[in-house]
Amino acid sequence: MLSAHTIPDAFSPSECDRIIAIAEEGALDDAGLVGQRADHNIRRADLAWLDERAGAEWVMDRIMSVVARANREHFDFALSEFAESAQVARYGAEREGHFDWHSDIGLGQVAQRRKLTMVVQLSEPANYDGGRLELRADRATEEARTERGSATLFPSFVLHRVTPVTSGARWSLTIWAHGPAFR
């Protein structure tokens, strides 16, 4: 089974600051699930979609470069597009921000074509407690690295979660690369 792959220097600390600032320029939406469902027992976070924010074009350019590099070096998946906007999520302690165990492949027309997930750590790990990205590709649970600017990439079918944030706030950037069904 393919495991997670980390690119520790995907974004610089100043670029992480810029992404958070772009997200904060407008109101953040309550995070939902695939199909516009909401269940705060499963997911509690605030979101900004970068395609709805001015000045975020450079982020997608970087995302394409990082995903291409990781796919070339580690996964070798047949990828064809980014059919969804990148999302910036804020998991705040005031809401016990979290996202329970799930995979990113869903029943929707677009979500069912997700093949590769990338999550970028935007926050300094010292600015919050909890909020760990954990992955379970098999029986073992693996914790993603928390260095600011690091990108963790994994097959979209891998179970993963964000543990509850108990103090402060964790910011992350998530994108999915799409392609034909796995065979």
Image (cartoon, rainbow, N blue to C red):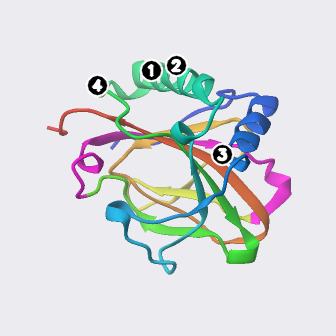
The spot of residue 47 in percent (x, y) is 58, 56
Q: Is residue 95 above or below residue 147?
A: below
Q: Is the residue under label 2 in contact with that under label 1 (CB below 8 Å)? A: yes
Work out whether mark 4 precedes mark 3 in sequence or the reverse, and give the earlier one: 4
Q: Circle 1 sits on which residue?
A: 68
Work out whether mark 3 precedes mark 1 in sequence or the reverse, and give the earlier one: 1
Residue at 70% over, 40% down: 22
Q: Which residues are magenta?
A: 107-129
Q: Circle 4 sits on which residue?
A: 80
SS class of the residue under badge 3? loop
Q: Circle 3 sits on which residue?
A: 145
The spot of residue 145 in percent (x, y) is 66, 45
Could you say which is closer to the camera, residue 178 or residue 26?
Answer: 26
Q: Circle 2 sits on which residue?
A: 65
Q: Is residue 181 above or below residue 103?
A: above
State yes or no: residue 119 in magenta: yes
SS class of the residue under badge 2? helix
State yes or no: residue 175 in magenta: no
Callout 1 environment at 10 Å: few (<14), some (14 to 19), or many (20+)? some
Callout 4 environment at 10 Å: few (<14), some (14 to 19), or many (20+)? few
Q: Quadrant of residue 173?
A: top right
SS class of the residue under badge 1? helix
The spot of residue 99 in percent (x, y) is 53, 67
Residue at 67% over, 31% down: 8
